[in-house]
Image (tube, rainbow, N blue to C red):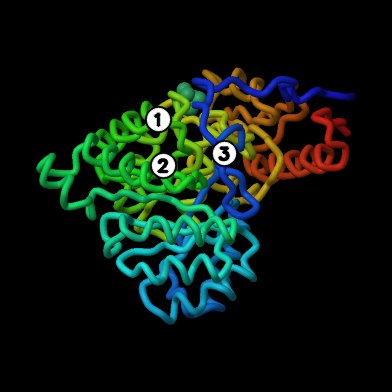
Amino acid sequence: MSINLGMPALPPPTLAPRRKTRQIKVGSVLVGGDAPISVQSMTTTKTHEVNTTLQQIAELTAAGCDIVRVACPRQEDADALAEIAQHSQIPVIADIHFQPSYVFAAIEAGCAAVRVNPGNIRKFDDQVKEIAQAAKDHGTSLRIGVNAGSLDPRLLQKYGKATPEALAESAVWEASLFEEHDFHDFKISVKHNDPVVMVRAYELLAEQGDWPLHLGVTEAGPAFQGTIKSSVAFGALLAKGIGDTIRVSLSAPPVEEVKVGLQILQSLNLRERKLEIVSCPSCGRAQVDVYTLAEQVTAGLEGMEVPLRVAVMGCVVNGPGEAREADLGVASGNGKGQIFVKGEVIKTVPESAIVETLIEEAMRIAESMEATGDPTVTIS
Ligand code: SF4
């Protein structure tokens, strides 16, 4: 029997059309215009420890990271950039604060892009012409990264603190300096740790130019708080079509940042959904341990690349309905689990066999989808 998994012919709906931005290149990744919204992260290793840094970049790449940024606080880090840029599978951005000479070093090292913080690079505005020329000569793009914690003193004085207006004005000013030198290959970020200030700053910026925007809530905090702050802030902006590349900042391993970033985009249909577990929160009606069941199914299917929606439901109230809506699902009750594939009950198994059966069925469907590229599966 052949069952259609209901893959939509048209792209799934989003909350708003993307804001029209100019497109730039960050190495092999396009940012802005109609390019997919990319996910970035930043290594936590000492950049000059090249092997460790490349190892972490490989882990980030495997997790789905599109672009990686590395810190460059010392000369030895600047010296390591060429080797890192050459061996990384994804574009490398050098993150430069304070030392203007490292901007040129990063460009010459072949980094895909350089993040500059005009607020703390000495005499930055005087060097825009040279930076723009060097970047042009090497095909390097830039990010003008304005940060609440290192705002231009002139604007701090004018606004009293890092308000949305101050952040946006700082970014627009720096952008104008590069544009005066006919350099346009840059994106902008205006980060703040308060999602309300951050969202407003990006909105103001989006009204004033077609620059591609890199979204970030800076110093968002530990994983739980940072995930929520970033999701809320990015969600508010992406729902208006604002944002061309994102970085979730967490006090957690960078792979977690990538997972959260991808999940935010997938939730808004801005990335193709991959594996999605729909599990109920459980309640007094549950007839199985939903948490354990959902965890075991999630663990068993980790890394699955096909867009499969798997429903794990605790009882018969919403269970059959949700399980039917999913590609694959289980509705549990009375020590048994009814296994559904796209709305049809294919078997009923004892509770002890639910996890194993769901994983087996998921693997079978995934194999069929990968082999044929067709969302139609054949039930044995
Ligand atoms: S599916 Fe059943 S167990 Fe799960 S939350 Fe709903 S009513 Fe409760």
Q: Is residue 260 visible?
A: no
Label whose residue precedes the other's in the sequence (2 or 1): 2
Check disc 1 and report its element: helix, strand or loop.
helix
> For this view, does 310 lie left or right of residue 50?
right
| Tag of residue 23 | 3
Check disc 2 and report its element: helix, strand or loop.
strand
Viewer-side residue, 199 vs 311: 199
Could you tell me how far apart the alpha carbons at marks 2 and 1 are, in whole angstroms? 9 Å
Could you tell me how far apart the alpha carbons at marks 1 and 3 are, in whole angstroms? 19 Å
Quarter that holds the N terminus: top right
Contact, mark 1 vs mark 3 (Cβ under 8 Å): no
Q: Hey, which quadrant is residue 283 in on the image?
A: top left
Give above or below for 346 relative to 131: above
Contact, mark 2 vs mark 1 (Cβ under 8 Å): yes
Dot 2 amino acid type: Leu
Residue at image point 80% right, 23% down: 4
Could you tell me how far apart the alpha carbons at marks 3 and 2 are, in whole angstroms? 16 Å
Badge nearest the viewer, 1 or 3: 3
